[in-house]
Image (cartoon, grey):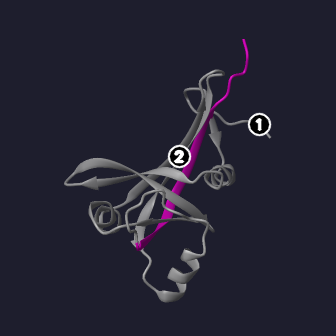
Amino acid sequence: MAIRTDRHGLEILDEETCWQLLSTSYVGRLAVSIANQPEMFPVNYAVDGRTLVFVTAEGTKLAAAVLGEGVAFEIDAADPLFHTGWSVVVRGHAREIEQMDELMAAQELPLASWSSHDKRRWVRIEPLTVTGRRIVHRGD
């Protein structure tokens, strides 16, 4: 299969590869809009099927995520020695998990907050798009 590239020569990752990469990490960045200004928050997360789940406390992040028009979520990795790396971006909608059976299932995910704050609000990101790019050192 031929490698697809974008106009900058970056490899375009297929959705399956993006989900594989999402499954390898525990921390990502949640992007929301607050008063028409972009904000980013680091969150611990877990992949659940083809959705992402994170736990948070009441406050700005929760309100902006579930009441806003949409969210973006990003993870990446880079190797500065070889000038390689990748990035995956999930765009979609977030909703608070409130039904008891869904909440109990989410609590069984391998997800633990690194923060010492009491976090009891579970949120699911339901993707509309999942995209990724990779820069590969091909040698000169």
- Inspect the image, locate mark 2, and give the three-letter code of the amino acid beneath it: Ile
- Residue lying furthest front in this view? 116
Q: Is residue 87 above or below residue 53?
A: above
Q: Is residue 17 above or below residue 133?
A: below
Image coordinates for residue 108, horizontal then vertical, percent: 60, 75
Closer-to-camera residue (125/40) = 40
Q: Is residue 44 above or below residue 12?
A: below
- Inspect the image, locate mark 1, and give the three-letter code of the amino acid beneath it: Ala
Whole-number angstrom distance, CA of label 2 to CA of label 1: 25 Å
Is residue 37 on the magenta stretch?
Answer: no
Judge left or right: residue 87 versus residue 65. Answer: right
Check the picture and name the quadrant holding the C terminus: top right
Judge left or right: residue 20 versus residue 63. Answer: right
The residue at 38%/68% (across/down) is 118
Closer-to-camera residue (13/60) = 60
The residue under label 1 is 2
- Residue lying furthest bottom in this view? 100
Image coordinates for residue 92, horizontal then vertical, percent: 45, 61
Closer-to-camera residue (5/61) = 61
Image coordinates for residue 110, horizontal then vertical, percent: 61, 66
The residue under label 2 is 75
User: How many numbered circles are shown?
Assistant: 2
Q: Which residues are magenta?
A: 120-140
Judge left or right: residue 123 versus residue 19. Answer: left
